Amino acid sequence: MRSIIAIAAIVAVAAAVTCPPCDQANCNAAPCTSLAPYYCAAGRSAGGCGASADSWNNTALCTSCCDTSACSSTRFTCGACSTSFCESAERCSILAPYMCTNGSSKWGCATTGSFWPNQHMCDSCCDVKTCEKKCQACTAAQCQSNPCSSADPFVCTAGPLKNGCSNVSTYFPEQSQCFSCCDATACPTQAPATTAAPQH
Ligand SMILES: *[C@@H]1O[C@H](CO)[C@@H](O)[C@H](O)[C@H]1NC(C)=O
Ligand SMILES: *[C@@H]1O[C@H](CO)[C@@H](O)[C@H](O)[C@H]1NC(C)=O
Ligand SMILES: *[C@@H]1O[C@H](CO)[C@@H](O)[C@H](O)[C@H]1NC(C)=O
């Protein structure tokens, strides 16, 4: 591909050639990124990408081209993650929350929502920020098994970080390795194991 682009650059001249916007089939097939959005759909260079429409102004190289620039809005967007993706240890971190969920880049993470729709190696994506669930008050059973002190009342209740403790309410919701959490603030304080006999 790199060599195709180099050859195309050599033959490219100032003449303006317009590659029309790609249709859905070409959007899905094109491996082009925003750096080289012009896709050669037919001809010897079929499957190649060029930085300018002029790249393909050579019928010997390419007989049909199109512009992938507008493809992202037509392929897919990163919506809410399903529970199985939220509760996967491979889940992306909040630092790069757009996760590819199918295709050869599955489990890849990106910082912008427009990234995966522009990658042909990815067929769908989701936003792991939608996995964040506020820590609700712990249930009686969770209070019973709460390993955390009152100084760190937020408890991770599922996932690799299970039984972790934090004093920050937003900490576990943002952790990719914690799938659920609860707030032990209102748990009854643990009664002492034995009570002293009344003194007379
Ligand atoms: C392609 O470039 C040549 C110059 O090398 C120019 O004469 C020609 O008009 C261009 N073709 C189109 C379709 O613009
Ligand atoms: C993932 O992609 C494969 C191949 O294109 C397809 O068969 C499968 O249904 C897709 N799975 C999901 C969950 O979209
Ligand atoms: C959490 O604990 C750390 C260290 O003990 C402290 O610096 C921080 O202020 C605490 N944050 C909250 C929200 O209580």
Image: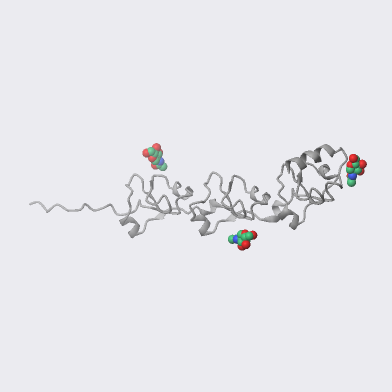
Residue 16, image x and y in percent?
86, 42
Can you say whether 6 is above or below 193 in the image?
above
> 126 or 47: which is nearer to us?
47
- Direction from residue 129 to residue 117 in the image, left or right: right
> 162 or 59: which is nearer to us?
59
Residue at image coords 48%, 48%: 174
Can you say whether 24 is above or below 5 in the image?
below
Residue 104, image x and y in percent?
62, 53
Residue 8, image x and y in percent?
81, 41
> 12 or 76: which is nearer to us?
12
Number of marks drawn: 0
> 80 or 87: which is nearer to us?
87
Residue at image coords 26%, 52%: 190
Residue placed farthest to the left in the image?
200
Indicate the quadrant where residue 143 lies. Answer: bottom left
Residue 33, image x and y in percent?
70, 45
- Direction from residue 168 to residue 43 in the image, left or right: right
Ligand 3 in which quarter: top left
Residue at image coords 66%, 56%: 76
| Rendering colour mode | one colour
Q: Which quadrant would the N terminus be assigned to in this image? A: top right
- Direction from residue 86 to residue 54 in the image, left or right: right
